[in-house]
Structures are given as C-alpha cells and as structure tokens.
Amino acid sequence: MKRIALVAFVAPLFFIASSRITLAQESFPRQRLISVAGTAEINVAPDEVILSLGVESRDKVLATAKAQNDASAKKVIALASGVGIEAKDIRTSALRMNPAYSDDKTPRFLDFEVSQRIVITLRDLSKYETLMTRLLEAGITRVNGISFQVGQTRKYKDEARSKAMQAAKEKAVAMAAELGQTVGKPWEISEQDSDNPYSGILANSVSNNSERAEPEESTVAPGQVTISASVRVSFQLE
C-alpha cells in the first residue's frame, strides 16, 4: 500500500515539472538564424627571402675535414654580416660527420665527409643577387632551398579576415532578402582554418643539388604571396 501511494504522489510532481519546462521553452523560443561563410584573399609582394645553404668538406683525417668546414662556415657568416644581415637572421644547424666508403664488393674507406647547413634570412631583396654571387664564391657547395615570403604576415592576415567578415555580412543580407527577411545582430562568429596558414608561406622555391652552382643574371622573380582568411558567422533574422 505504501509503495503505490508513493508512485501516485511522484506522478503529479513529474507532470508539474514537465509543464514548467514547456512554459520555459515557449517563453524563450529558438533563435531564427542564418549562418554563412565568408572568405577573402590578399596578394602581397614578398619582402624577405630565406636561404637554406650547405657547406661540405672531405678529407681522410676527420679533424682536417672538420677544420675546413668550420673555416668555410665562418667565411659565409662573415660575408652575410658584411652586407648588413643581423646575427639573429643567421643560424647554423645540422652538422654531420660521416665516413664515406666505395661501392666495391668489399667497401673501401675513402674519406670523412663533414657537412653543415646555414640558414640566412635576407630582409632586403635588393641585395639578393649580390649576396648569392658572393656566397657561391665563398665556398657554398649546396643550395637546399630559396623561399620568398612576407615578414609582417599578421598585418595582412588581419586585413584578409576583415574582408572575409564583410563578405559574410553581404552574403547573409543577400540570402535573407531573397526570403523577405532582414539581417540583425551577429549571434556566433568563428574563424575557419585556411588552406595556406600565414606563417611560413612560400612564394617560390628553388632546389640545387649540384656540387657547384653558377650565378645567373636577373633571375629573381618572387611573384606574390596569397594570404587568405575564412570565417563563419550566424546572424539573427528580424
């Protein structure tokens, strides 16, 4: 008898709670929204170039090969500093020292190979041709890559995002007008991942794996870097 009475008492309470939820939903109806995506692109001329270079040396004595490599690297660094490149824009990495053997059936020791990578950021493109010619003369044996890019990417990314927001608003207004509606305040805003993130954008890339590259005249064509932004915005309909 007590168990039946308890069930009978709980049922009215559940009905009252459900009624309150229904009333609350009616008091706060679901927002009428229109969601659109906006994208924008900005083409910018690159203002700096990153040079990934390599110096190599060989000798049967490891200490001698290492000393030769150190001398070449110091010469390259001094040359870069001499044209006004700051120390923070010159870095060395990937020092390797490996013994080299012949391809005979019984491998025969040839010598030690010492290699080092030097990365230089040149922020004055007018010095590019001169710098490359002098670097090749200074003992650079490998050009791993040359990439042109934009230094102040944040500035242009913000500009692209602003244009993307404007494009989203214009699209929402046009779509709503087709249905006889007007667009109100934004309800939700989010930024979408773009295909080309603005950090480390490459405009051009050159690879040279020959032992020695001869300088060419008037071959610089950095083109333009495309910086894009994409947003998604939900607007209230009025």
Image (tube, grey):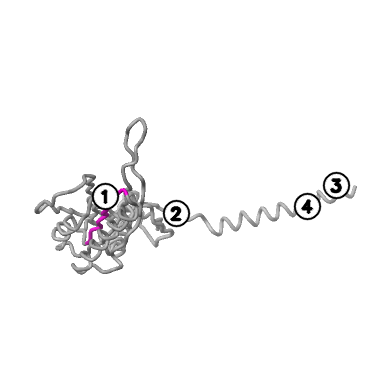
Disc 4, SS:
helix
Magenta residues (range): 48-60
- 51 inside magenta stretch: yes
Amino acid carrying mark 3 in the image:
Ile
Can you tell which mark lies on residue 10? 4
Disc 2, SS:
loop
- Which of the marked residues, 2 or 3, is nearer the chain's N terminus? 3
Q: Position of residue 87 (x, y in %)?
A: 29, 68
Q: Give the residue displayed 66% in from the left and 54% down from the top.
A: 19
Q: Quadrant of the C terminus?
A: bottom left
Secondary structure mostly taken by the magenta-highlighted segment of the chain: strand
C-beta proximity under 8 Å, tags 4 and 3: no
Q: Position of residue 66 (x, y in %)?
A: 32, 56
- Which of the marked residues, 4 or 1, is nearer the chain's N terminus? 4
On screen, residue 106 above or below 59: above
Q: Of residues 127 and 159, which is closer to you in this image?
A: 127
Query: From the viewer's perspective, is the residue at label 1 or at label 3 nearer?
Result: 1
Can you tell which mark lies on residue 4? 3
Q: Give the residue displayed 86% in from the left and 48% down from the top.
A: 3
Q: Residues within 10 Å of mark 1 (few under 14, many from 20)?
A: some
Residue under label 1: 144
Looking at the image, residue 221 sits to the left or right of residue 64; the answer is left
> Which residue, as the protein is rendered here, is positioned at the far top?
105
